[in-house]
Amino acid sequence: MTRSPRIATVGLTSWDTLLATPGYPAVGGYEVIEEIASLPGGTTSNTALALAKLGARVSFAGMVGDDELGEQLRVALEAAGIDLRWLMVRKGEPTDTCYIVVSQEPPDRTIYWRKGAKIIKGDPLDVPAVFGHDLVVLDFDDPPLLRFLTDLPAHTLPATRLLGTLVYMAEFTDPDRFDVMLRFDALVGNEREMRELTGASDLDGTIERLRNGMVGANLRAAAISRGRFGGTIITRTERWDLPAYPVTVVDPTGAGDAFSAGIAWGMARRLPWDRTLQLANALGALATRRLGAQASLPDWCEIAELTGVPEAEWRE
């Protein structure tokens, strides 16, 4: 069997408290809470865990606070077999936490973020070791660290392949943020994030701006999660659109992170883009079946059942 891909993830982990409700109340009103769950979360660690469940050899670089929640996150990630040599502890700061209202109608979630310890430029990080993986996923909200890490491969580590997520990066206010994004080998985000990054008003305009930016740049592909409409991947000259897989949605929290894991697996294994998109769509759909971002991340048996594609074909 082909060796498991080695994937480094750099970014954020947090502890989630989820409140499941039938719907959102009117302003000044109330709604009944039907279920409460307190679980590990965080965009980057969600992606890392999804990849680990697929059999990737995953490293996570990030920061937690010196509190009980930080230790619980460490234990959960270690139990998944994730390499935590670069998970650091910020003394005197709390661990990042999110409070998430999950609605049945409409099926959506609203996140209230209490920012805590996070990785920033200046934190000790063994860059050559991290960048020695088959793929590096960057997913954090510190612009100076983003500039530093995306500038390195062109000068010192040209073999490094970078996947950038737009969860935080699309909201950076730097005037040249789009040019910085062009340093990645591929980008992944939802349609709203891609529009914010490019300044386009619709999907076609977003794709045109991305393709124009690819000329003479490092960026080779962009993967766009489109929710119930499925997903899209574009290169300079090609485009793939695939519909969403039908599942009963309980909680969409973390679906985009699972979609990103599918793109990361496909890039690390150098799968064709259409097959990579198929996997990303499956991961994103299956991640919504239970309350919590990590509660229903699938294994290969579940992916094979949904897609009809045997596990061996994803590993070729």
Image (cartoon, rainbow, N blue to C red):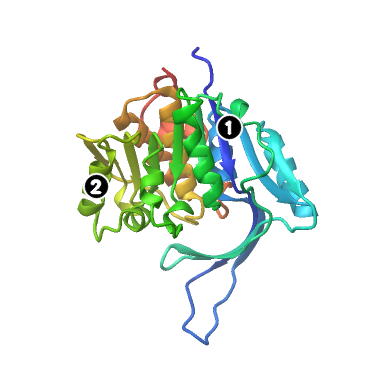
Q: Amino acid at mark 1?
A: Ala
- Rendered position, 242 above or below 199: above
Does dot 1 land on a helix, a strand or a loop? Answer: helix
Percent position of residue 172, x then y: 46, 57
Q: Which residue is mark 2?
A: 207
Q: Is residue 32 left or right of residue 210?
A: right
The residue at 46%/65% (across/down) is 104
Q: Is residue 222 left or right of residue 42?
A: left
Q: Report the front residue among 176 and 201.
A: 176
Q: Is residue 114 left or right of residue 279?
A: right
Percent position of residue 155, x then y: 47, 28
Residue, far bottom: 28
Q: Is residue 167 visible?
A: no
- Rendered position, 203 above or below 50: below
As measured in the structure, the alpha-carbon distance from the residue carrying label 1 to the one carrying label 2 is: 31 Å
Tag 1: Cα neighbours inside 10 Å, few (<14), some, or many (≥20)?
A: many
Percent position of residue 54, x then y: 53, 30
The residue at 58%/32% (across/down) is 52
Q: Report the front residue among 139 and 75.
A: 139
Q: Amino acid at mark 2?
A: Ile
- Tell me which corner region of the image, top left, top right, bottom left or bottom right, holds residue 210: top left
Mark drawn on residue 52: 1
Tag 2: Cα neighbours inside 10 Å, few (<14), some, or many (≥20)?
A: many
Does dot 2 land on a helix, a strand or a loop? Answer: helix
Q: Report the front residue among 233 and 290.
A: 233
Percent position of residue 154, x then y: 44, 30
Q: Earlier in the sequence, mark 1 or mark 2?
A: 1
